[in-house]
Image: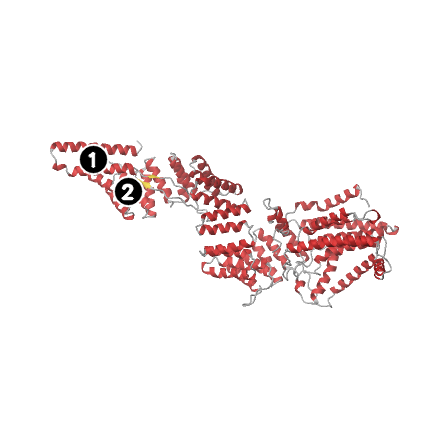
Amino acid sequence: MAVSLKEIGLIVGVVIACYWNSLFCGFVFDDVSAILDNKDLHPSTPLKNLFHNDFWGTPMSEVTGVVGRAELLSSIFFLTAFLSYTKSKGPNNTIVWTPIALTVVLVAAATLCKEQGVTVVGICCVYEVFIAQGYTLPLLFTTAMQILRGKGSIPFSLLQILLKLIVLMFSTLLLVVIRVQVIQSQLPVFTRFDNPAAVSPTPTRQLTFNYLLPVNAWLLFNPSELCCDWTMGTIPLIESFLDIRNLATFIFFCFLGSLLVFSVRYPGHSSKTVLMALCLMALPFIPASNLFFPVGFVVAERVLYVPSMGFCILVAHGWRKLSKRHVLKKLSWVCLSIVVITHALKTLHRNWDWESEYTLFMSALKVNKNNAKLWNNVGHALENEKNFERALKYFLQATHVQPDDIGAHMNVGRTYKNLNRTKEAEESYMIAKSLMPQIIPGKKYAARIAPNHLNVYINLANLIRANESRLEEADQLYRQAISMRPDFKQAYISRGELLLKMNKPLKAKESYLRALDLDRSNADLWYNLAIVNIELKESTEALRNFDRALKMNPNHKLALFNSALLMQESGEAKVRPEAKKRLLNYINQEPHDANGYFNLGMLAMDDKKGSEAEMWMKKAIKLQAGFRSALFNLALLYSQSSKELMALPVLDELLRYYPDHIKGLILKGDILMNQKRDILGAKECFEKIVEMDPNNVQGKHNLCVVYFEEGDLLKAEKCLLETLDLAPHEEYIHRHLNIVRVKISSAGGGERLFLPPTGTTRVEGGKKPPFENLEESEHKSTQTMKNDNNESRSKSNMQLEENTDKENKKTTKEISDIEKKRVAALKRLEEIERILNGE
């Protein structure tokens, strides 16, 4: 029957009216894992991964569940496949193969979206036999008996049916084989909390599973109380034949059986409509019925999407039958209006329940308070809002509702940890651990454990390894998790981190390599392995593994940052452009991280690009006030580029945050003495250095220079002797001490000799060692007394001393010549002094 545009418009209008408010809801529940955290949705992920991973982005060979992909998308392909198959019957009962081929393709698409999509083949078979060919069950039975008795040949129509069904069945079998091959013949792993009846004994298991059928039927008939999660204790187990709920099961099967007999026994439009409605209700529901294999839920409203189509057909057919009766026509329209209005209002109200995770799970708790998972999920929602105190109350309630729920105790432990209550956190983790199946020595561990429950070992180990004395205990927990599940990738990763902390880089490397055997496409693993390479001084291999991480994820922030630092530290000019490129990519992702700008500044300093270096350093300081390394290196940059006075306010800011910054004090003292001739200011800087660190040779030496500048030669001599005790092999201290002594010996002449002030050489970095917290790490500055000039000064004074000692032994003429030479030597010294002082 054709559908008019008016009818289409009416349906679209009703749908929009019912669901417009859902546009204001966020991503909740499974949306977070399936959409927000799904790596398959990243632009950089290869398209082929969609066929290797499940709906959650997890490899199908590891944690695969019956849930599969989106039910709605599967439903679309499901209906399209069926509609395509209805076109396969041509004139005179011929077969049109194009729609059949298209059906096979659409069945595959429906199955890739969700496993129940394959059941459309069963519906096509029923349609072919009972609708397209017009058979009833008695007629089919009679025809089959006549053929078996040899009283007739096989009808052409039956041959056509068999040919079509063989093609469909063979295609379906091939699809199932491929599907099983993809999941590597592994069934999903579920715990008894997901589906308690699945692990219950007979007859509890059978009675409960059968009771779930009328429960689902009631949800279709009266969806007044909806719940996002029906696992755990939502529906108590039926443990006896005397349970009153068995009556509902009996009534359901009686009603279903009567409809089935009517649909297959009698010809006519009504029976065919009922048959197709029943097929749409029953066949797609079979994978979720627990009849052939257990599923990870007790009841799930989402698996009723396709069955609801059959239910709607059944309701519509009944209403149409009633509306044709004149007496019930008005009543039928009234009833239809009531159903549409009430269900529309219910839909609008229900949409608001999905506004956030908190509203969703709170609405579920109104339906059922016996499901520990719901209490946990409300706690998770509050935890995401950093409301740990309230979250703890819900997690604790979950442990009261289900005392043996491992996940609930893990949640309690994690929340205690977030509240810095480590003792209570450890106690909760220990309770969760005690609920895990125990390993029996000498026996192979064969229990099936949900991977998230194995995280109790990871969480407990992560907690106790904060105590340096318990590192071995933490390692034992990681190894226990690995022994329970050798493919537990996270255990290898966490153990690798611990072994690195225990200064066992070779074992850490082995652990990471084992994890890479399980997942070579994990960028984080390649990054972690590069960290180990750094510890092992394998810089080339570290850079290679950083590159592998970036190949998997070109925007891996830590790999970008630290590989750039590794290139920078290599000192090779040819790699600096790539290092800069990676740092620019990093700050593009982390525009508020001052460290990225700082290291760009250091690269620019290495490339002798002063203006660019200044720009990056200023940006780093703007983002992070008191950035120690950036302030010092900016001041150093000014001092090296003849902008010494511009360095002073930068150094003042540095010393305001870090008054004990020795290198900053040295640089400030040098600038004050060299540029401003502020000897008192310089003296204050150097005295502070010596006060903080009496063994600081550089600060002590510069203070000696200040004493000399003040004309206190004896104090300068004493200071230099003390400095020489600290560094007896420093040639420049010996030389300067000789200069002071020469000056003391000639002090009777009345002249004042000025030693040249010291200078600070360029600091080559401020680079951070990679992979550690970004703290200050400046290169050492070197103090000299202008070695070449001081060498000539030292020789002049030595000559002066020699001449003076011999003075009394000479004649008057000789004395006069010597005096002339002495005056000339003093003039040369003064000239050297003026040059050194920049005069």
Disc 2 secondary structure class: helix
Q: Earlier in the sequence, mark 1 or mark 2?
A: 2
What residue is disc 2 on?
732
| Pointer 2 local density, CA inside 10 Å: few below 14, some 14–19, many at least 20 | some
Local crowd size for mark 1, using a 10 Å CA cut-off: few (<14), some (14–19), many (≥20): few
Asked which quadrant contains residue 220, the reply is: bottom right
How far apart marks 1 and 2 lie (CA) works out to 26 Å
Q: Give how far across and how far down residue 794 sits, in percent.
A: 24, 38
Badge 1 marks a residue whose secondary structure is: loop
Give the residue at x 85% y 62%.
149
Q: Is residue 468 visible?
A: yes
- Left or right: residue 166 versus residue 200 is right
At 72% from the left and 65% from the top, the residue drawn is: 207
Answer whether residue 314 is visible to the viewer in this image.
no
**Dots 1, 2 in contact, CB < 8 A:** no
Q: Which amino acid type is marked by label 2? A: Tyr
As rendered, which of 75 and 431 lies closer to the eye? 75
Give left or right: position of 534 versus 44.
left
In the picture, measured across the screen, residue 163 lies left or right of residue 562, that is: right
Q: How is the image coloured?
A: secondary structure
Q: How many marks?
A: 2
What's the residue type where badge 1 is placed? Gly
Outermost right residue: 326
Q: Is residue 408 above or below residue 709?
A: below
Q: Choose top left, top right, bottom left or bottom right for residue 783.
A: top left
- Residue 475's spot in the image, x, y percent? 49, 60
What residue is pinned by disc 1? Answer: 750
The label shown at residue 439 is none
Give the quadrant of residue 225: bottom right
Q: Quadrant of the C terminus?
A: top left
Q: Position of residue 1 (x, y in %)?
A: 82, 46
Q: Position of residue 635 (x, y in %)?
A: 40, 39
